[in-house]
Amino acid sequence: MLKILGKASSINVRKVLWACAELDLPFEREDWGAGFQPTSDPGFLALNPNAMVPVIQDGDFLLWESNSIIRYLASQYGGQRLYPAEPQPRARVDQWMDWQASDLNRSWSYAFMALVRESPAHRDRAAIEASCRDWARFMGILDRRLEQAGGYVAGPVFSLADIPVGLSVNRWFSTPFDKPDLPAVAAYYDRLAERAGYRLYGRNGTA
């Protein structure tokens, strides 16, 4: 059986858990990370030298990096409806997954650490305001994309890209600051909540 190493509250672990729900894929999970078994443990470092969760073990196959993991699971376990085999539709899914992992994530990092995690290292008011502005700018890009695409980020039907993007949208609504009105993002947030996997691992009150 597939084994997932990582605590369930981690946004990147939740990508994998949600993907498993979409694929109806059984798994076992072990708690690793802050508050649980430390990822600095030599046994964990032998699996992922970056000391980060999640890691999966699928038989003899070992993999880390959350977006790589969910791409693998969709490819390995009949998830073509989520991750098309055709090059152009697949590239569109990859584009939005990579955008979430790079541009969008970088924009909200400081604000989230300051406003939700209340990190002592993230107390610079100017940096918080700059992060909130950048975050709002990228969410505006997402809002316009959702209006154009017809419901989901890669097109009119749910795809693998909606897993990382949907979790970031949950984080947007869970972070307390003044936000612009983004009606397409709000409708998307409600649309995702119709999915059992998102209710379990996404819009569940955990940022």
Image (cartoon, rainbow, N blue to C red):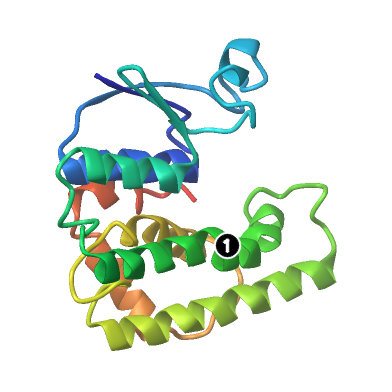
Residue 173, horizontal then vertical, whole percent? 47, 65
The answer to whether residue 122 is left or right of residue 196 is right
Residue sitting at 38 percent across and 62 percent down?
A: 94
Amino acid type shown at disc 1: Ser
Does residue 154 appear in this view? yes
Q: Is residue 72 above or below residue 103?
A: above
Q: Count residues near mark 1 (Cα–Cα under 10 Å), then give few for <14, some for 14-19, many for 20+.
A: few
From the image, tell me which residue sits under label 1: 102
Residue sitting at 49 percent across and 51 percent down?
A: 207
Residue 158, horizontal then vertical, whole percent? 21, 64
Q: Nearer the viewer, residue 47 or 197?
A: 47
The answer to whether residue 154 is left or right of residue 36 is left
Q: Is residue 48 above or below residue 103?
A: above
Q: Secondary structure at mark 1?
A: helix
Quick one: quadrant of the N terminus?
top left
Q: Nearer the viewer, residue 32 or 60?
A: 60
Residue 128, horizontal then vertical, whole percent? 75, 67
The answer to whether residue 2 is left or right of residue 134 is left
Residue sitting at 29 percent across and 63 percent down?
A: 90
